[in-house]
Amino acid sequence: MSDTGEPHDFQQAVLLLEQEVQLLKERNLKLSQQLERQAQRHQEVERRLNLHPVSGLPTHYRMDQDVPLLLDKWKDQPDFTVAFLLIQLDSKFEMIKRTLKASVAEWILYQISERLREVTGETGWLYHTRDNEFLLIRPFRTQTELRILMKTVGAKIAEPHLFSGFNLMLGSHTGVSQFPADGFEKSALLHYADVALGYAQEQSQAVALYRADLEDRVIEKMELQNAIIKAIEAPALKEIGQQFELFFQPKLTLAARDDGRFRVEAVGAEMLMRWNHPTKGPIPPSRFIPVAEETGLIMPIGKWSLYQVVRKLRRWKTSSLKDVSVSINISPRQFRSSELVELLDRHVAEDISLASRLVLEVTETSLFEDPFVALESLTNFKRLGLKISVDDFGTGYSTLSHLHKFTLDEIKIDQSFVAGFPENAQDVAIIRSLVSIAKELNLNLVAEGVERMDQVTELYRLGCRTIQGYVTGKAMSEADLAVFVDNLAARDWILPS
Ligand code: C2E
Ligand code: CA
Ligand code: CA
């Protein structure tokens, strides 16, 4: 047995232990440095999550954290009433974003946040929840006070923005829910404000207060859906026509004459569906088409109406309507499906002359939702020789710079830009830029919703020569369209002024 090895072993063990401790210390230091860096990164992410870069207002993320805490506090105050205002800028904002410089949109957002900050005051909370959306939360005492608050918000946003000599005007829609009348939870209050916002948008009103019956509309929608099913349930496709009817609205291409009047160079017609319900009476397409689209019922309705249009176009060949081309609205669901291409293919194969007289109106959303699918559908339509028109232009979310990727023939300026034309300088600016884009891409430009002759003159002066709207004619039956065209021919194609 040796006793000399022991101290040596012991020293070595201590050394080893010290080394280990040193290593641990170093690892610890590294770890804490790493943690510190992580914390900094975390702070930066937090800051970005918490504050909107343009307005500097707290974001949706912040709101998600704050509101439950606020609600918890208020629950114990029986008489405390709070309004939740969900404010959304209208489609003009999107249009400004796309047509004017980015700095203009940013500047407008900043201005609006400043105005809303003022309305929010010291007693409320304001969040910039999405690019075009704000949530304003403010306590109120009486319903009158709430009404005034709602009115002020709408009015503040609508005030013009003066921008290098331009008066830019912006609309908004606001949905309002109330704590505690509508609910105690964040999710309920936001949902109800959103339901009210949807209603305000649908009704084109600035502000709507949530009411329980707004949700009844969902039930009404289901009833409508059942009625559509009944209407198209008829054994033969042809019999859908017992309730549905095709109307046509003239779309005229003009040329100015020396005497200041206009000559009609070409007549087109947009087919618009009418539904005469046996007990409910006429139901406008703005109500049943969205339901039909949502439920897929648009497919049999679309198939039937295309069949009808084709039959009519064939009949028109030997009548005064022989040169009239027909535009058909193609809903997003139809646009995506291969069924439509197959149907059109069959119709065109039977009568090749149809192709040059059919225009398909597709929405901007159809094109840009899935550009690859859209490209394929468009290629198929173009292969058949059909014309493609982009409907409601300016209301979707497309970027003008991507328009050239598609082979198109026409764009239709949405009615909302025509309604305030030419009084509203912003509408003038937007239409001007659409004229130059159409020219550049060699597209026909149509203004729809034109109601007055002075609008026709001004649109023509800016370079938009195809007009559709009440000024030249409302949607009418096939027989009335024939009379309309005959009358024009009798006047030597001069537009009545
Ligand atoms: P849209 O394609 O934008 O059609 C234009 C709408 O504006 C029509 O309403 C038309 O009557 C209306 N309008 C035309 N000129 C004026 C005017 O000067 N002033 C005003 N205030 N309004 C004018 P309508 O017929 O109620 O159709 C509404 C929408 O329903 C259409 O909008 C279209 O999106 C859809 N729709 C109609 N028929 C069909 C169809 O057969 N298939 C599909 N997929 N959609 C359809
Ligand atoms: Ca249309
Ligand atoms: Ca339209």
Image (tube, rainbow, N blue to C red):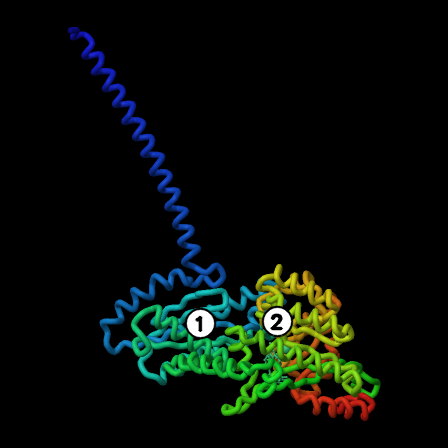
Above or below, comparing residue 209 to residue 12 in the picture: below
Q: Amino acid at mark 1?
A: Leu
Residue occupying image coordinates x 29% and y 69%: 71
Residue at image position (58%, 76%) is 300
Residue 351: give its label.
none
Quarter of the image with the N terminus in it: top left
Considering the image in quadrants, where does the C terminus appear?
bottom right
Q: Is residue 109 left or right of residue 99?
A: left
**Could you tell me if residue 41 is visible in this image?**
yes
Residue 298, percent from left and from top: 56, 75
Total numbered labels: 2
Q: Earlier in the sequence, mark 2 or mark 1?
A: 1
What kind of residue is marked 2? Thr
The answer to whether residue 28 is above or below residue 449 is above
Name the one closer to the observer, 242 or 261. 242
Choose between 221 and 234: the one closer to the eye: 234
Please provide percent x and percent y for residue 252.
74, 82
Q: What residue is rendered at 42% in x and 76% in y?
A: 195
State the separation of the CA atoms marked 2 and 1: 33 Å
Q: Residue 5 placed where, x, y %?
A: 20, 9
Q: Is residue 279 left or right of residue 390?
A: left
Q: Residue 31, located in which quarter of the rendered image?
A: top left
Q: Disc 2 designates what residue?
A: 363
State the image quarter where residue 178 is shown. Answer: bottom left
Residue 205: in sight, yes or no? no
Left or right: 360 in relation to 230: right
Q: Which mark is residue 116?
A: 1
Choose between 111 and 269: the one closer to the eye.
269
Give the image location of residue 117, x and y in percent: 42, 70
Is ligand 1 within 8 Å of the beta carbon of the residue shown at mark 2? Answer: yes
Q: Residues within 10 Å of mark 1 (few under 14, many from 20)?
A: many
